Amino acid sequence: MDLFSKQKNKKMVKKEKEPVSGWPFLSNLLSTLIFFALLIALYSFMVGEKQKTPEISISELAQSIIGGNVTGIVVEEEKLTATFKDGVQKISRKETESSLSETLTNYGVTPQEMHAVAIEVKSPSGLGFFLLNALPIVLPLVFVLLFFWMISRQVKGAGMQAFTFGQSKARIIDPADKSQRVTFKDVAGAKEAKEELVEIVDFLKNPKKFLDIGARIPKGVLLMGAPGTGKTLLARAVAGEAGVPFFSISGSEFVEMFVGVGASRVRDLFALAKKAAPSIIFIDEIDAVGRSRGVGLGGGNDEREQTLNQILVEMDGFEPAEKVIVMAATNRPDVLDPALLRPGRFDRRVVIDIPDIHDREEILKIHANKKPFGEDVNLRIIAERTPGFSGADLYSLMNEGAILAARENRKKISQFDLIRSIEKVMLGPERKSHLLSKKEKEITAYHEAGHALVASVLPYADPVHKITIISRGRAAGYTLKLPFEDKKMQSKKEFLDDIAVSLGGYAAERMIFLDLTTGPSNDLQVSTALARDMVTKYGMSEKMGPVALEEPGGKALFGKGLGEHDYSERVSAEIDAEVSRIMNEALSKAEDILSGHRKALDAIAKELVTVETIEHEAFEKILITHGITPKKREILPGIIAA
Ligand code: ADP
Ligand code: MG
Ligand code: ZN
């Protein structure tokens, strides 16, 4: 494993996801079911009520009239309610079209007999009747409406808000809320970035001063930096320093399923911010909406483009007098649409670097605040050993240290807790339970000894700090190399030596066991990628000359589709040939070193099998015994090769 490759891999930062619980849906369903049960009960009640009275046939009724037993009949359409002499009521039905007298006559009732009966004709009315007739029409309608209501509820549950879609989902931090307030004091290091941002703070605090003198204040500030370098933190600090409301939204939150939502959210957000001016709008992870338009895989995303257009329109639309500053953060400035970077938009760009040793110490100090430390703790040493760590990594290192101490029931965090946490943050937890068989242990020992020995002999490789065959994360074992200083640039000679060191494990396995395992696969990937970059990006191949053959940001992003190049097949073949030449030369360099120092290799491997971990003092002793001069170590540290 290689620390740097790991850091590069965690490119995109996690997106906030609201958990969608099943409960709202279930409770919806339940209430709907209950509602329907009630409806059905009501319906059957009304229908049932009419059927309590016994029913007789029309001929029976006619017979009763002839017999003189019926005193009165109430006619409601085809329904006849007959009252008998004894007060009993019975229901009968006639044909709808024919009149009662007609029907009775047909059944042999004479007019005289009919006169003895009081006949009352009622026109149908009443709520019950109305409902009875309306229900068959209304019920399906209710069904349909209910269905839509349920869908909309569910959609809301998934965070989509079908009927309030335009509303911005920005989180607002109120300057009056002291608990959430972040200031520049909470951000260690990043000196240049803070200097740039002080101007913005000044403007927000006292806009009149700037406007009176006719100064043009930037509308947009783009914070650029690797993940975890404190971009979000710094943006909040600007709002905290200026004491203005902070509207924050993540780029991905604009883009949702309904087309047009993003754009209307943007409008909403800007309107809100203008009302609260002076204020800050912060669009985190802006690359989610701000990627170059009209390109990309799968034919672009209309919704994203509309959102981006709306952001541009809003930014163009407001006047400096509006005192709203738009801040945005990204870790992929290379993929942003050029329109965003144009003057008058995000023309102020602030780069936040991975912290150097001094900044790392400061960041550690900030996060050490309120944690109980033992006397032996020296944050400077931790800072020395963590090159390449971002602010977020350091934060999690401190946290891991505290967890380790708590797990072992200690009241104070010791230096050793912190040191162990470094490797945990870099590579994941130690896997002591991952037992290697005797054979595997031997192979791993030779593999790591190979890396370490090549690194110690080659002049431009970083010196070895620690070797271990205790597996950690995905690596079976690893060799920790620490450079002399924090490097911003690397040379061709260093790259070539690095590749040879990476292949040291492979070379050792092949030489000692005359066989290969899957162990070196990561080493091969990392070093091949490095060799390819040398040829295509850095112009470090004599044969290809000073050309950059790869677009920054990767070829897939700029609308060329996967596997398409700027260059011809012939050039592509030449690149491949160059890469394999570099790799093969590095391999023979590693093999020469290992066979030249075979005794040292055996000694290191043997020691590893017995003690599992060799720290640098012990390692240097072995080197000296075998006539290799250890590299002069000054203070500084950093990289790993597994
Ligand atoms: P980014 O937005 O650049 O990915 P964040 O601002 O979210 O990074 O940083 C994550 C966490 O890392 C912060 O909440 C903070 O605890 C810590 N951190 C990062 N940089 C710094 C810094 N310069 N000083 C103090 N803490 C930092
Ligand atoms: Mg962030
Ligand atoms: Zn390795």
Image (cartoon, helix red, strand yellow):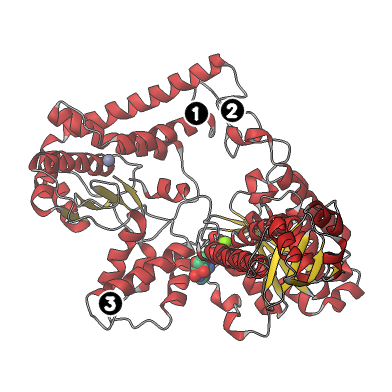
Q: Earlier in the sequence, mark 3 or mark 2?
A: 3
Q: x and y percent of residue 538 in the render?
A: 53, 34
Give coordinates of residue 568: x percent, y percent. Answer: 59, 17
Which of the two marks, 3 or 2, is nearer to us in this view?
A: 3
* Closest to the observer, 239 or 185: 239
Q: Nearer the viewer, residue 551 or 486?
A: 551
Q: Is residue 504 above or below residue 173?
A: above
SS category of the residue bearing label 2: loop
Q: Which residue is mark 2?
A: 547
What crowding class fits label 1: few (fewer than 14 Cα within 10 Å), some (14-19), or many (20 or more)? many
**How many other residues sit within 10 Å of disc 2, few (<14), some (14-19) or many (≥20)?**
few
Q: Could you classify mark 3 by the number of other residues whose Cα lies within 10 Å: few (under 14), some (14-19), or many (20 or more)? A: few
Amino acid at circle 2: Val
Where does the N terminus fall, quadrant-wise? top left
Task: Tell me the residue at 59%/24% (across/down).
Answer: 564
Q: Is mark 1 within 8 Å of ligand 3?
A: no
Could you tell me which quadrant the C terminus lies in? top left
**For the residue marked with disc 1, what is the amino acid?**
Val
- Nearer-the-camera pick, 247 or 215: 247
Displayed quadrant of residue 500: top left
The residue drawn where x is 13% and y is 31% is 512
Q: Residue shown at 63%/74% (left/top)? A: 237
The spot of residue 389 in percent (x, y) is 43, 59
Quarter for ligand 2?
Answer: bottom right
Closer to viewer: mark 1 or mark 3:
3
